[in-house]
């Protein structure tokens, strides 16, 4: 059974800092991995999707990497801003018709 | 604007009173799904649908029903709600199955309280 873990559960950083969020999964046979952002009272917004054949994806200040063999992904946020404060979730697809989510990392960027 | 719309956003109801949470998408997506989000448990899939008239159970289907009569709509039905169904519910859609490497779009969520 696929399990996804995100560490840390919460992270507080000063504005301008570069930071890394971690995601690990137990079954390396995945089709893809997605990173989402969830704001309080709002839905999830897809940030990046990495296919199993890819090593990384970039969008603006965000860079996500995937090491399928070790079951790890990282989300790198450059020059963090208060508007980046949110909960970040990673989810994998592996052999079933569903996304398996981690419990998320709650990020607070302090001005 | 491409979006997934859920209604209502907030709902308080009593045990046993049937309710429906609607979900509609305007992107002509084939794949739709319902999740519930609970503290400490994260997001778990309730039901999914790969196309019109094709639905299947997810991880936590007990106490829920769904239907997919039209491509754009995927309502979630609670025939006899109970307090353990108090949760935050999300509808999601994508162009195809998740393993087709298609981006997932989520609705704004429905916060349901059953008393």
Image (spheres, rainbow, N blue to C red):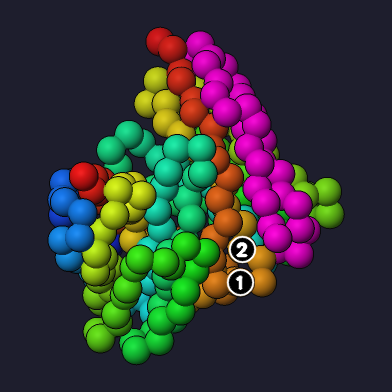
Quadrant of the drawing holding the N terminus of chain A: bottom right
Question: Going by the picture, which residue comes out furthest to the front?
Answer: B16
Secondary structure under the numbered disc 2 in the rendered image: strand
- Report in which chain the residue with disc 1 lies: A
User: Would you identify the image quadrant in which residue B74 lies?
Assistant: bottom left
Span colored in magenta: A1-30
Q: Is residue B41 visible?
A: yes
Q: Is residue B104 magenta?
A: no
Identify the residue under disc 2: A93
Task: Examine the rendered structure and indicate whether residue B33 appears above or below residue B70.
Answer: above
Q: Can residue B22 be seen in this view?
A: no
Q: Do labels 2 and 1 share a chain?
A: yes
Disc 2 or disc 1, which is closer to the eye?
A: 1
Secondary structure under the numbered disc 1 in the rendered image: loop
User: Would you identify the image quadrant in which residue A102 lies?
Assistant: top right
- In front of the other: A82 or B10: B10
- Report in which chain the residue with disc 2 lies: A
- In front of the other: A50 or B60: B60
- In front of the other: A1 or B50: A1
Q: Do the residues bearing badges 2 and 1 touch, measured as CB atoms within 8 Å? A: yes
Residue A62 in the image, given as x and y percentages of width and height: 55, 38
Instruction: Estimate the spatial distance between the alpha carbons at disc 2 and disc 1, rounded to whole Å.
Output: 7 Å
With A21 as the anchor, is B46 left or right in this view? left
With A49 as the anchor, is B35 left or right in this view? left
Q: Residue at x 32, y 34 (%)?
A: A40
Q: Residue A96 carries which label?
A: 1
Q: Residue A1 carries which label?
A: none
- In front of the other: B85 or A6: B85
Within-10-Å neighbours for mark 1: few <14, some 14–19, many 20+ = few
Q: Which residue is drawn at 45% across and 37% down?
A: B39
Q: Is residue A3 magenta?
A: yes
């Amino acid at each position: 059974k696929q399990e996804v873990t995100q560490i840390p559960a919460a992270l507080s950083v000063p504005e301008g800092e570069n930071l890394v969020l971690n995601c690990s999964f137990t079954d390396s046979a995945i089709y893809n991995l997605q990173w989402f952002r969830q704001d309080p009272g709002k839905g999830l917004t897809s940030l990046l999707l990495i296919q199993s054949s890819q090593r990384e994806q970039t969008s603006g200040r965000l860079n996500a990497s995937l090491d399928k063999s070790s079951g790890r992904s990282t989300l790198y946020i450059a020059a963090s801003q208060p508007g980046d404060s949110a909960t970040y979730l990673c989810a994998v697809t592996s052999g079933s018709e569903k996304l398996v989510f981690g419990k998320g990392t709650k990020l607070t960027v302090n001005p | 604007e491409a979006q997934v719309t859920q209604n209502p956003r907030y709902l308080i109801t009593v045990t046993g009173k049937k309710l429906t949470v609607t979900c509609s998408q305007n992107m002509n997506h084939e794949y739709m799904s319902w999740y519930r989000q609970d503290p400490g448990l994260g997001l778990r899939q309730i039901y999914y649908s790969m196309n019109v008239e094709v639905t299947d159970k997810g991880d936590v289907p007990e106490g829920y029903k769904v239907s997919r009569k039209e491509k754009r709509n995927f309502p979630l039905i609670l025939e006899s709600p109970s307090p353990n169904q108090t949760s935050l519910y999300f509808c999601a859609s994508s162009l195809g199955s998740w393993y087709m490497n298609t981006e997932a779009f989520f609705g704004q969520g429905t916060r349901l309280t059953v008393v």
